[in-house]
Every structure is written in structure tokens, then in C-alpha cells.
Amino acid sequence: MDEIKSYYDDLITRYFLGEATPEEISGLSDWLSRDPLNIKLFDEYRQTWLLTVNDAVSSSIDIDKEWSAMAEMIDQPSSTSQVNRSLRKKSPIFSLSTSWKVAASIIMLAVIAAVFYYTTLTPNMVEVYAETGNLEQILPDGSVVTLYKGSTIEYPAE
């Protein structure tokens, strides 16, 4: 009998701590529905739990001290900004952020050069399409190409 009571005492404690599994909660619910004395015992545990939790929270917080600390932090914003400025002054000459800026500039120049090259320096292309039937085409180098119906060829204009 004491082992069963001890089991449910532990189970109720785990329930209030939020550590009980769904199966244990279901078992606790069944146990509570079996006897009104079980419900009474559970309510006593619950009231004791609520009193200890409220007492622990209210005893660990000094509201006046917390408000005073908050007021001091609000009244002295300039001291923290001075500290931040002094930390910034000690940064190295070539910092990581400068490295990223240089790398981004080099990449931008490379992209602009690539766009310029492909838009202006690539030769104009001629595309020939054999739409209705076979087509013979003479290319600029003098070679002859036969295109069958539906086929396409593309070559530089010059």
C-alpha cells in the first residue's frame, strides 16, 4: 500500500514539474477518477505546490531594487555610447569589413567587365533555319552545309 501511495506521490510531483509522460498523466487521471480521497490528496498537493511556487518567485525578486537599476540604466545612456566609441577607435587599420568591401568591389568590376565583353565584343551571329524543306547554305569560309527540314545552324557573320 505504501509503495502505491509513494508511486502516486512521485507521479503528482512529476506532473506539477511538467515531467510526466502522456501515459503517466492518463494513469493519474484514472487514479483520480477511482476515489474521491485521491482527488482530495491531489488538491492538497496542488495547493502546497502553488504556495511554494508563489513564495519562491516573490522572495527572489526585489521590485524596488529592480526599478532603481532600470532607472539608472535609462538615465546614463551617454556612458555606454562613450564606451562604444572608444572600442571602435581601437579597430585595426585593415579590418574585416574593409576586406569585404574590397572583395565586393573586385567582384563588381569583374561582373561589369564580363557584361561589357559579352555584349560588345562577341561577334554578330547569323542563324539559318530550314523551314519548308532541305536547304543548302554556303558558309563564309566557303564550305557548303545541307540543312534538312526543321534544322537550324548558327555561325558568326564575319
Image (cartoon, rainbow, N blue to C red):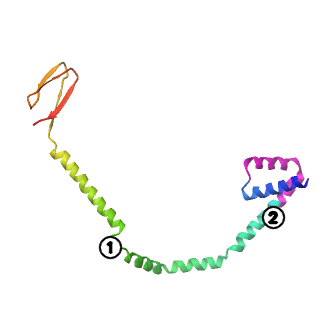
Main structural element of the magenta stretch: helix, strand or loop?
A: helix
Q: How far from the left and from the top, in percent, is residue 29? A: 80, 48
Residue drawn where x is 27% and y is 60% of the image: 105
Q: How far from the left and from the top, in percent, is residue 11? A: 79, 54
Residue drawn where x is 61% and y is 77% of the image: 67
Q: Which residue is mark 1?
A: 93
Residue drawn where x is 55% and y is 80% of the image: 72
Amino acid type of the residue that numbered disc 1 sits on in the rendered structure:
Ile
Work out whether mark 2 precedes mark 1 in sequence or the reverse, and give the earlier one: 2
Query: Is residue 46 shown left or right of residue 153?
Result: right
Q: Which residue is mark 2?
A: 48
The part of the image, by quadrant, that contains residue 44 is: bottom right
SS at mark 2? helix
Q: How far from the left and from the top, in percent, is residue 95? A: 35, 69
| Image mark for residue 31 | none
Amino acid type of the residue that numbered disc 2 sits on in the rendered structure:
Thr
On screen, 27 above or below 141? below
Dot 1: few (<14), some (14–19), or many (≥20) neighbours within 10 Å?
few
Q: How far from the left and from the top, in percent, is residue 62? A: 67, 76
Where does the magenta region start and end? 20-44
Between circles 2 and 1, the one closer to the viewer is 1
In magenta segment, residue 23: yes
Query: Is residue 14 shown left or right of residue 95?
Result: right
Query: Is residue 155 shown left or right of residue 82?
Result: left
Residue drawn where x is 30% and y is 59% of the image: 104
The part of the image, by quadrant, that contains residue 109 is: bottom left
